[in-house]
Every structure is written in C-alpha cells, then in structure tokens.
Image (cartoon, rainbow, N blue to C red):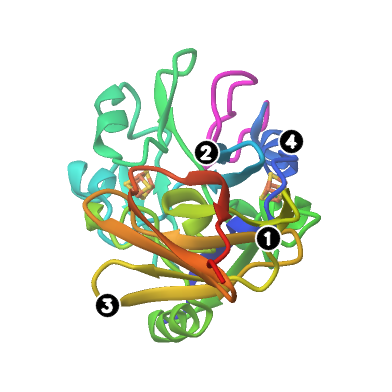
Amino acid sequence: MKKWHLIIDVEKCEDCNNCFLACKDEHVDNDWPGYSSPQPRHGHRWINIQRKERGKYPMVDVAYLPTPCMHCEQAPCVAKTGGDAVYQRQDGIVLIDPVKAKGRKDLLGACPYGAIYWNKDLDIPQKCTFCAHLLDEGWKEPRCVGACATGAIRALLITDEEMRTTAAAEGLEVLHPEYGTAPRVYYKNLHRFNKCFLGGSVAVMINGREECAEGAKVRLNNGPLVTETTTDCFGDFRFDNLERGGATYLLEITHRDYQSKGLAIDLEQSVTLGTITLVQIAA
Ligand code: SF4
Ligand code: SF4
C-alpha cells in the first residue's frame, strides 16, 4: 500500500514562506467539504517555518525548519477520538473531520508537535490536510511543494518499506522521534536545526604578526576520535552535527613548527572559539 510522505531539506529552506502563502491561498476562505473548512486569514500556520540561529560572529548560521502536521502513523490526535473525528486514510494522510470535531478544543493538546490550531469563529480544530482534496483529484503534490522554488520539500507516494530505504540512503531523520508517533514527514540535514557546531580560526605568529594558519590539523575527541579536519586558507575550521550537552570534547590543534594546543569544551550549544594562536617551537 503506497502512502504519502514529505521529505524536507533544511539546508535548502530559505524562509521565503512561499509554502505558507500557498497554503493560505488554497485554504483561506475556501471550503473543501469532506476535507476541511476555511482556514482563518490570521493566526494559523498549517506549515510553520521555525528558525534557529547558531554560533556567534564571525561564525554564525541560521537554519529554517518548515513544520506541517507530521501525518503520524501512531497519531495521538487520532487515538484521542478513536479514529472518528480525527482519522487516518489508507494513503497515510491524517484528517480532522470539520463536522465531527466541532467544539473539540481539547484536540490541540493531543498533538505533541503543536500542529493543530483552533478556529474560534467556526469552533473547530484545524491543521494541514496534505491538500488531500487536490490529491484526490489527481494532483501529484500538495500546494506547499509546488510553491517551493528551492526544491526544499518533496512529496512521495511510496510504501513504508520504500520510505525506510529512502531514509537510510539519504540520511533522513524525523523530528522528535522520542515522541514515538512515527511521523510521515522526514528531514534531510536536520542537524542544522537540532545539533551543534564547533568552529574557530587558527593563527600563527610570523615576524611578530598574527597570520592565518592554513593546513593546521584539528582533531575533536570525546574518548574515541570523533572527527578531524584541516584549517582552510583563512585558518578556519568547523565541525558540525555534534551532540549537545553531556559530553566534554577535547580539541587538539597541531601545526608544523608550532606548539600544539588542546582545549576542553562542554558543548551546551554551538560554539565559535574565535582565534587560537599557536606559538613557535623554540629552536
Ligand atoms: S517555500 Fe521552500 S524555501 Fe520557502 S519557506 Fe517554504 S520550504 Fe522554505
Ligand atoms: S503531527 Fe500532530 S496533528 Fe499531525 S498527525 Fe501527528 S499528532 Fe496528529
């Protein structure tokens, strides 16, 4: 049985909000009987773009995380209504029945992702429908996917087995697997949002002046070797996709003719170390 899935590449999202606006265009003032009632003009973000800034000047980055309903296979919102007012279709899409769910404000608390919004004018809970009304008419993708100019969102109608294979091949992850809801939305480069980086610059003293140290070896350990790299022509290095909290990392910097340097770092968040200057080995 083929089911709908989304793959969202965090690296490709530019926060243009075209997907959000396409969702508004499709659902605000539009009634899709059997699927959804009109979305209010304000207050609802059926695909919400979260933002995360990491590091500090001069080494800083920003990542954007589009978060629609995850259309979970083990959806707490479905369980809360016994599969009646909120139900999962055979193609994996989770829908809120706008008639049966009337007055069910309690459903907002059932979603650990915060994907359900309250429509106070219609007295109903609402969320992303995966544009099921369009797919049932033969569309190949929901409106958000078609609106994304960078190709950050893909829609796939494939079996669970094919999705598992795709996830393994492309290194995909789900958001908050600890919730145990088996989401159908997968992310690529999720580390840009939920992991840390550690970076800095290495310099050496030449004739009393600080110069960029190109080619310095930088190793990052927390017991067994974690990873290593070499500084670029600006003396910069950067490690990404590091777990935060709990681990103390040891940073070792070596460069020919200069004394090695070691630093112990507790990584609670992304760290920009600034410039680390190596001293020449005495002749
Ligand atoms: S349309 Fe694409 S690039 Fe723009 S915010 Fe949405 S996912 Fe990101
Ligand atoms: S993300 Fe929330 S609203 Fe969507 S299916 Fe999962 S539990 Fe339900």
Q: Which residues are magenta?
A: 29-46
Q: Is mark 2 within 8 Å of ligand 2?
A: no
**Dominant SS type (magenta):** loop
Whether 249 is drawn above or below 16: the answer is below
Where in the figure is residue 108, as x and y percent of width and height?
32, 30
Amino acid at circle 2: Ser
Most distant residue in the front direction:
283
Amino acid at circle 1: Gly
Q: Secondary structure at mark 1?
A: loop
Q: Quadrant of residue 256?
A: bottom right
Q: Earlier in the sequence, mark 2 or mark 3?
A: 2
Q: The C terminus lies in which quarter of the figure?
A: bottom right
Q: Earlier in the sequence, mark 3 or mark 4?
A: 4
Name the front one of labels 2 and 1. Answer: 1
How far apart marks 2 and 3 lie (CA) works out to 53 Å
According to the image, label 4 marks what residue? 25
- In the picture, measured across the screen, residue 40 lies left or right of residue 96, that is right
Residue 68: tell me if it is visible.
no
Q: Is residue 31 magenta?
A: yes
Amino acid at circle 4: Asp
Q: Earlier in the sequence, mark 1 or mark 4?
A: 4
Q: The N terminus lies in which quarter of the figure?
A: bottom left
Most distant residue in the right direction:
149
Would you call the spot at circle 4 few (<14 residues within 10 Å), some (14-19), or many (20 or more)? Answer: some
Where in the figure is residue 121, as x and y percent of width and height?
49, 13
According to the image, label 2 marks what residue? 36
